[in-house]
Amino acid sequence: MLIHVRHRTRYTYDRPVQSMIQALRLSPRNHEGQYVRRWQIDLDQDGTLRPGEDSFGNVLHMLSLDGPLSSLCITVEGEVEMLDTNGIVRGALEKFPAELYLRETPLTQADAAIVEFAEGIAGKAGSNKLKILHGLLGAIHADIVFDTQQTDTATTAADAFRMKQGVCQDLSHVFIAAARHLGIPARYVGGYLMRSDDNIHQEAGHAWCEAYIEGLGWVGFDPANGICPTEAHIRVAAGLDYLGASPIRGARLGGLAERMEVQVTVADSYPQELAQQLHWAKPIDAIQQASQQFQA
């Protein structure tokens, strides 16, 4: 399956920004079942974009700009060839042993309620870790209502579990907290999802998680949809939690209040208005070529 993505993030500021630096985790890597055919990053302001990778092996572009800037628009656009691997992740760059992903973070700390929930699932599933993880997946999907109005990027797993509401980020944090409490390494994954309802226009990217099972390796779980990732899931970045895999993080000098608008389009063919805007200079963009040196 060939999936086309356009992800546009626009910032506007009350007063001009004097300078800015941002870390962009917006570029997917190749691994089994995922091949990046074309990918590029475009800016509407002059800046310096340096390709590299972060400590988890994600493609990382460091963006620095000098002001004055009253606005900034970052657009990523590309094509990724996807194959279904039954949720199993093979061939991804792994810089740490799986045990690192047992490490608790403030966003994924298991409180007493999550501990009780996790142990209840494990008690029913027995010692089979795959069965335990599927039990967590089904229960979190059934118990927590998807709601974009109740949480934000600072919401913890404990808060989302208590409210029984949240977005894909929150459901993933709850899954990770429960799995780690049970001694199963788990990590957060950010990327894109081509929806099955043919709604190609979305307000944000997608998030799910992966858990490590001895003898099988890393396996993906998408609590927001109650499924393991399919060929419709484009994997972009992974980390201990959202902060380690966030698409854009940074700091600025000046600007006062900031407003952000995000538009994401994920489709198996470009809508006409997007096709007219494609302007690939080469089969693989220069930025992607620079990033490929970090694949080894």
Image: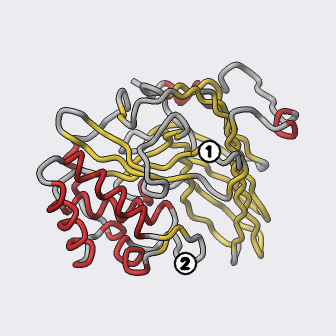
- Residue 273: where, in percent of width, then height? 87, 40
What residue is rendered at 61% in x and 48% in y?
A: 63
Looking at this view, name the residue that lies furthest to the front: 124
Q: CA distance from mark 1 to mark 2?
A: 25 Å
Kind of residue indicated by mark 2 = Gln
Query: Crowding at label 2, few (<14), some or many (≥20) Cα neighbours within 10 Å?
Result: few
First in sequence: mark 1 vs mark 2: 2
Image position of 56 (left or right of 15): left
In the picture, residue 156 is in which quadrant? bottom left
Kind of residue indicated by mark 1 = Ser
In the picture, residue 266 is in which quadrant? top right
Along the line of sight, the residue nearer the viewer: 25 or 14: 25
Image position of 165 (left or right of 276): left
Quadrant (top left/top right/bottom left/bottom right) for the C terminus: top left
Looking at this view, name the residue that lies furthest to the left: 127
- Residue 224: where, in percent of width, then height? 48, 58
What residue is rendered at 23% in x and 53% in y?
A: 132
Q: Secondary structure at mark 1?
A: loop
Quadrant (top left/top right/bottom left/bottom right) for the N terminus: top right
Q: Note whether 239 is above or below 182 in the view shown.
A: above
- Residue 267: where, in percent of width, then height? 69, 39
What residue is rendered at 22% in x and 62% in y?
A: 121
Q: Secondary structure at mark 2?
A: loop
- Residue 7: where, in percent of width, then height? 68, 47
Q: Which mark is residue 196?
A: 1
Image position of 58 (left or right of 174): right
Q: Note whether 169 is above or below 93 in the view shown.
A: below
User: Looking at the image, do the residues carrying marks 1 and 2 touch, with CB atoms under 8 Å apart?
Assistant: no
What residue is rendered at 83% in x and 33% in y?
A: 275
Q: Which mark is residue 150?
A: 2
